[in-house]
Each structure stands twice: as C-alpha cells, then as structure tokens.
Amino acid sequence: MVFSGLPILQLLMIAGGAASLTVLLYILKLRRRAVPVPFARIWDAAFRDQNATELFSKLRRLLSLLLQLALLALLILALGDPKPKQSLLEGRHLVVLVDASASMKAVDVKPSRIESAKAEVKRLVRGLGSADRALIVQMGALPSPLSTMSSDVTELDPAIDSLRASDTRADLERALSFAVDGLRGLPKAEIVVVSDGVLGDVTEISRHVELGNVSLKFLPIGKSGTNVAISEFSVRRYPLDKSRSEVMLEVANTNDRPAQVELTLLGDGTIIDVSRFALAPNERLPRYYQDLAGASRTLEAKIRFADGHADDLPADDHAYALMPERHRARVLVISKGNTYLEAALLLDEYLDVTTVVPGRSLPSEHFDVAILDGVVDALPNTVAAALYLNPPEGGPLKLGARLTDFGFDTWDRKSPILRFLALADVQVADGRALTPSPGDRVLGASDQGPILVSGARSGHPFVALAFDPRNSDLVLRVAWPLFVLNTINAFVEEDTGYVSSFRTGEVWRIPVPSSLDSATVSDPHGAQHLVPVKEGRAVYLGEEAGFYKLSAGSGSDSVSSEFAANLSDLAESRITPVTELSIGRQKAAPVSIGKAGAKRELWVYLLAVVLGLSVIEWVTYHRRITV
Amino acid sequence: MGLLDLFRRDTAPRAKRRERALFDDEFQRKLEMLALVSRRVFAGRLRAERRSKKKGSGIEFADHRDYTAGDDFRSVDWNVYQRFGKLLVRLYEEEEDLSIYLIVDCSSSMAFGERKKFDQARRLCAALAYVGLANLDRVTVVGVNDAVISRMPTTRGKGRIFKVFEFLSELEPSGVTDLATALQTFVAQHKRRGLAVLFSDLYDPAGFEAGINMLRFNKFEPYVVELVDPAEARPSLKGDVRIYDCETGEERELTITDGVLDKMERAVVDYRAGIERFCAQKQVPYFPADVNTPFDELVLRVFRRGGFLR
C-alpha cells in the first residue's frame, strides 16, 4: 500500500489534531444537561433497570468514541489517497479509437450507433484496472484526441460525452498512425477500435501503418440497417441561359431488397419537384433534372421511403447545393457590325450591351468588358477588360506571320474560357499569328503559331483571338457563343467552374477573391471557424453537410459567399455493420470488458465506508442503541 | 443603582401581586360560599358542639361511676341511690372547642415548577381555616419542612381569617422534607390534640409514613391532603440529562426516552398508590389534590368525604 495523496507527516499532524478534537468533543458530550426534579427517589425506581446495565452503557459509549475515531482514521486514510502497490506496476495503455463517421449516426441501435459506442466505451473505461491508462480519440476525417492518457474516470467520462459523429468518412489509417505514434515506447499498448466497421477499404492500411507490438482490438457497434442515400448531387446553370439550371444526382439503395423511394427537390426552400420511383437491390440510379426553373440560389434534395418512414441513416437523405450568384455585366461592343457576335450576346439576358461604331467617342460609364471587333481603339480606364477579335497592329499583342487554312491544334482545356468548347475541327480561312508578351498565356494555337492569348495590360485583363471568326466555321458552331460568354464570365469573375457543393471530410479550398490571410467560415450549426487563406483560397476541412457561409476582410474590402457541402459517400451509406476487423494479417481481437468499478480509487471506498458507518451511528444514536 | 437593584425593584412588586392574587376578593367570596355550604351540610348542629371523648362537666349525660371520697355531692345521682342503694356519680360529656392544625409542607419540592403545588396548598389551607374559624374552632397553621419553620398562634373567629392570609402569604418554600422530624417537634409543641391536616406532596426521602405515624401515635387525627402536579409524572425531557433532586441535590445521569418516561409515569402512579394504600390501612383520610382542580371543588370533596366537620 502506498499513499499518493498528502504526505505521511502531514497526515499524522491532521490525524493528531482531529483525534484530539474528537476526544474533546466526546468529553464535552459526556457533560450532560443538568435538570432539577422534585423527587429523585421516584426516578430511581424508574431507572432501576437502567442502572443494572450501567456497565454495558459505559461500554457502549466507549464504542461510540471508538467508532468516531475509526471514522476519523478512515477519512485521514482517504486523504492520503492509498493505492495498492500493484498500481505502481505497469498497466495497460489503451488508445480507444471511436468511429465518428457518418455511418455512426445510424439509428438501427437506439438511440444511435454513436451513443451506443459511447456507452460501450464508458463500460470499457469503468472496467479498466487500477494501473491501466486510456486515451479517447475521435476517429473522423482526422483523428482528434479528446483526453490525455489517463486512468481518471472523471477525465475520461467528459471526453467520451464530447464524442460527436460527423458527416465524414472515418480515416482509420490516420487514426491508427496516430495511435501507434502515441503508444510508442509505452508497455502493454493496445488499440481499441470502436466502430460499426464501415471504414471503407482497409486492405491497404497495413502497408502504411506498422502496428508492431501494439495489440489491436475491435468493439463492433450496430446491428443492421436499411438505408437509401443521395450519393451525388450537383447543380449548374446553363451557360447559355443562366436563369435555368440542371441537376444531376444519384440515389442509391444499399439494401438487399428493392425499395420504393420518394425524392423531393427544393429550390430556395420551396418544393419544385417530387418524384417516386423504385430502386433495385444495391442499385445506384443517376437522375437528371433538366431545364429547372424556380431556384435562384439554393437547391436541396431529400429522399425517403415512399411509404413515408425514414431509413436508419438520416445523414445521407439530404443533399445541398448552391447556385452561383448572377451579376448583370456591362459590355461595350466596338464593331462595324457583326451579326454572329450580336447573336451570341443576345443569348445571355444578364448582359447589358452597348454598341459603338469604331471612331466614335466612347461612353464614359464603367464597362466590365469591351469587345473590339477588328479594331484596337484606345480604351479608357472605365473599361475593366477587353476581348479582341482579329486585332490589327497596335493592339495589345504584336502580330506574327499570316496564317491560312488553319485551326486549333492545341488549346488549354482547363481554361474557364474554353470550358465546354469543342474546337478540334474548327476551320479558319486566314488570320495572323499572335506574339505573346512575357506573362501572357497562350490558350489556343495552331501548328503555325498562337491564335488565342490571354494576359493583362496596365492591370486590365484581355483575351485576343487571332482571326475574324466570320472567316471560319467557328461562328456556325455552339462553341462560338460559349466562347464569347465564357470570356465575359471570366472577366466578371463569374466562375464557370463553380462547385455547387463540396464533399464533407475533404479539405475544401474555397475561392476568396482577395489577398487576405484568413477568412471566417460559419458552419450549418452557426459555429464560426477562422480558417487560413492560401493562394487565394480559404482552406477548411468540413465535416458537416449543409450550407456554409464564408466571410473575409473588413469594411469596403469585405467579401462574403456561401457554399454547400454534402456527405456524398456511398461507402458511408452502406451501413451494414462489420463484426470483424483485420489490418493486414493481424485480426483484431474482441474486447473483454472488465466489471464496472474494478478500477475505482480506494479512497472512494473509504469514503463510502465512512458514510455507511455515519449512517449506522446516526440510526443507532437516535434509536438510543449506542447511548 | 446597579443592575441587581433594577431586578429587585421589578421582582418584589411582582411577588406581592402574586401573593395578593392568591387570596383575592374572588377567593374570599368562594370562602363565604364554602362556609355557607358547610353550615347547610351540617345543619342542626350547634357551634362548638363537637364532643370530645373526655367526660367532664358538660350538660349531656354520659355515664355513671362509683362515688369516691372527694366527689362533688351535687353530681351524686340520688335517684339511683333511692332505687339501688348505691352512691353513683353522674358523668357528663365535656364539651370543648375543636383544635384544627393545618400543617403546610414548605419544602423546596412544593415550589417545583411554577409553585402550583405550594399555591394550591395555601389556598386549601386558607379555605379549611376559614371554615374552621367560621365554626368557632381553634385553628392553628404551621409551616414545616425538616423542622417547624413557622407557626401562626392558635386563633378562632371568622374575623381572624386575614391573619391566616397574612401568615400563609409570608411562607416561603425552602429546604428538604423531613416530616417525621418536623412533626415530632410539632406534637411536642402542641399538647392539645385535635385534627391535623397535612398539606404536602409527601416527597419525603425518609418516607412519608413516619410523618403520618408521628401524628397518629400522638393522638392527633391526621388528614392527608396530597398535592399532585400531573406535569411531574411526565416531564418534557429528552435525551442525555443529569437530573438532580431539587431538595437534596442528589444526581443521576440518565438518557430520557419515551419508554423511560412511560416508566417514570408508572413509578409516580405506584408511589401515589402506596400513599393511598397506607392511609387506607391506617384509616387516615386521604385527599389527592390536583393543582389544576379549583380549590373550592377540592374543599367540597373534603366535606363530602366527611370527618372534617361533625
């Protein structure tokens, strides 16, 4: 027995003082209240029996004093925090990896798998030996330690209570790496994985994680469940008609039975489509909703069984998407007349087009984009960007050799300007090769030279096309209006590569149109997170599905945007639990949970004894047994 | 003027008021009523006609005895001599005033609690004294504890009742009870025998029997009026206490519980039953006087019991 509380000397001093005080109080207690009576002889008669047991009475009083001293001794002992010697010996060191992935939100066990896991972990903690230590780790997209390596139930319990399942996949590999690192050098190391086994493909983990002498145990959670999911959800505006949009989604039936489901689409919170259909067992069914109108900002999809009842995993029954915001762009066209150009500009009702004949004075208003059709008029600073079509000499680029009978042999397919464009067989009669300056970017070229270049002059971006489109068959193709509109959108920073929703559990890089160091992300629950901005992108690991808000900067430089996030992980949607776990050749052993209370501190028992004795003393005193 | 003086100034008038209230006008009206009642109960009897056992010079014939030299010739019954030829002397019952001795226990136990026993004893004493005085008996009031501590000279006549009040008001309970010793002194001081009414709680450590026997053995006719305070049978005590006798100071350490109080109650009942049994055996009239019963009711009970007035 060793004392880990107060030092022995201090304990002895307290014991001495308290014992003296107890004896003093006992003596004072023996000084009874004096009460006069008219005739003591009658009392003698009444107490004849009591006098006969006076010796026993004295003995009982002595017992009362001894009991009080025993209580005192127990309390002093408790203050010393006694521990058995074996508690100083090596105990087990456990890292408990609790699966906090989306599948743990399943409600096939009541109230949910994560709550069931918490209860199991609490039982595990209470069953630890007195020398055992445990570390609680939440295993989500990233492993998050929630406690220190401790044997103190009062520290481990709050950590277990703080476990929360997220809308992400659990990264077992990272969690095991973390656990192995944490257990390195510690004796009797164990990793306990508490999970429903929905951990994706674990066969590759053993290549990257070496468990060594660390023993692996698995505590399975969950029974079985039925689930249908929205596994993909995406929305985009039509490039040629941004008032309308189309939705692509995929629904999946993860069960071995067919399912009748009801899919609801909501635009800006209002139902815009409800459809019912059947899903075959384990079927993944892509669905397209074309030409959708009625949603200007948000789109949501909800799925449930057609009979109205919900499945066992609500987290993947709801998907979110945000459509890019629209801005009315002011376009200045300097042209002698170009029917194809005018037709292309007519396709986007959000364009505010002003046409000026070359040589005339230019309007003094602000324009987002100027399109110079065969001219190179000097542009005022009120014009933000320019698209040059077949520019003559004197333009932003020097002209090279004359080209004839050529086309696009190479082009930058990732450029937002050339997005959705099929340029492979465009035929051009003639034109001039462009000579890009340093910093300019060649977006398209024939084997004879660059024919499409982007860059910036005096802070104003530009795009130059080396030929008159009317001298080609480009104007007869769909690619022509797309090229014009993509270029305008690129200039007005309307991202044609807009992502309608992110996937939870991944690191998101959200465009921030400014050079700020940090931004603030508000998650769907309203909690705010300060996130770093790197290379014009706010970097954030999102773990919850729903709508997010991002804000950055302050005052006139402040920007804000919204985006959506979805689980979109079919692996997590397959919630059928797995009862065994193997990492490489090591199969996880089952967890044996000791009896609760086996590791309680000894002082707790001492206090319990004190309490029990106090109750006995109280009862016997008031029943006049020990007095 | 010190603090103690303030207390003295306050307490003295209160004590006086208390004593005045003891024998107030209401009390005196009740005494009148009791006197009337006593006359009605014993109607037809003459005043001072309580006959003594002594044969003497009264007017009522009692017996004859042989003539002896020196007898008064006037008392010779000549008719008998004429008929039987014997000289016999006529004897008459001697008529004398009754002597009533009212003995009030003035020990500390009589003042226990709120002096209810002592006050009741004094009221009863005053009431019986008044009735006695009204009947032209010779009334003597004596205060005792372990000795005769105070004595009111023998008196008679209704008008002397205020002397009785004054005497009783000045009695102050103190000391221990020793009836045997005190009454031994009493009988030595009072050669004229008569009715001796003892007002006491009979809490005599030496035993109440010795005191009563002292009266009996000295030819007094003892009456025992036991003052009873029911609160003493079941005191409101609880827990560990050290009790001490208010007279002797004897101490006992006890733990009072409900069971103990029950025992105590039974002991008090047994003690009183012992008194009653003793008095019954010795043919001594015994009256328990509850302190909570009005004194006039108790006096009437004494009258009904008989023996006090003949």
Image (cartoon, coloured by chain):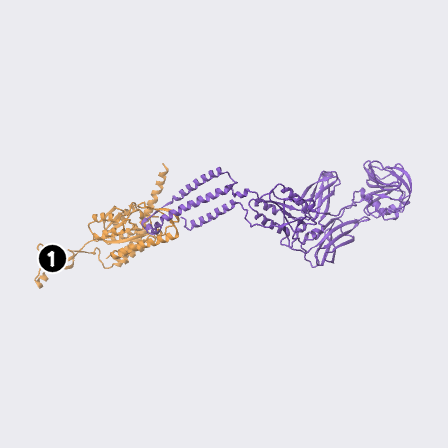
Chain colours: A purple, B orange
Quarter that holds the C terminus of chain B? bottom left
In the rendered image, residue A418, in percent from the top left (x then y), is placed at: 83, 45
In the rendered image, residue A590, in percent from the top left (x then y), is placed at: 62, 51
**Total of numbered circles in the picture?**
1
In this orientation, which residue lies closer to the viewer: A282 or A93?
Answer: A93
As drawn, is A101 to the left or to the right of A470? left
Residue that mark 1 sits on: B75
Q: Quadrant of residue A405?
A: top right
In the rendered image, residue A377, in percent from the top left (x then y), is placed at: 87, 38
In this orientation, which residue lies closer to the viewer: B4 or A546?
Answer: A546
- Observer able to see residue B280: yes
In the rendered image, residue B240, in percent from the top left (x then y), is placed at: 39, 47
In this orientation, which residue lies closer to the viewer: A135 or A209?
Answer: A209
Q: What crowding class fits label 1: few (fewer than 14 Cα within 10 Å), some (14-19), or many (20 or more)?
A: some
In this orientation, which residue lies closer to the viewer: A581 or A12?
Answer: A581
Tag 1: amino acid: Ser
Residue located farthest toward the bottom when viewing the structure as drawn: B83
Q: Quadrant of residue B277?
A: bottom left
In the image, residue B214 above or below residue A432: below
As drawn, is B130 to the left or to the right of A279? left
> Given the image, what chain letter belongs to the residue carrying mark 1?
B
As drawn, is A516 to the left or to the right of B204? right
Quarter that holds the N terminus of chain B? top left
Tell me the SS state at disc 1. helix
- Observer able to see residue B138: no
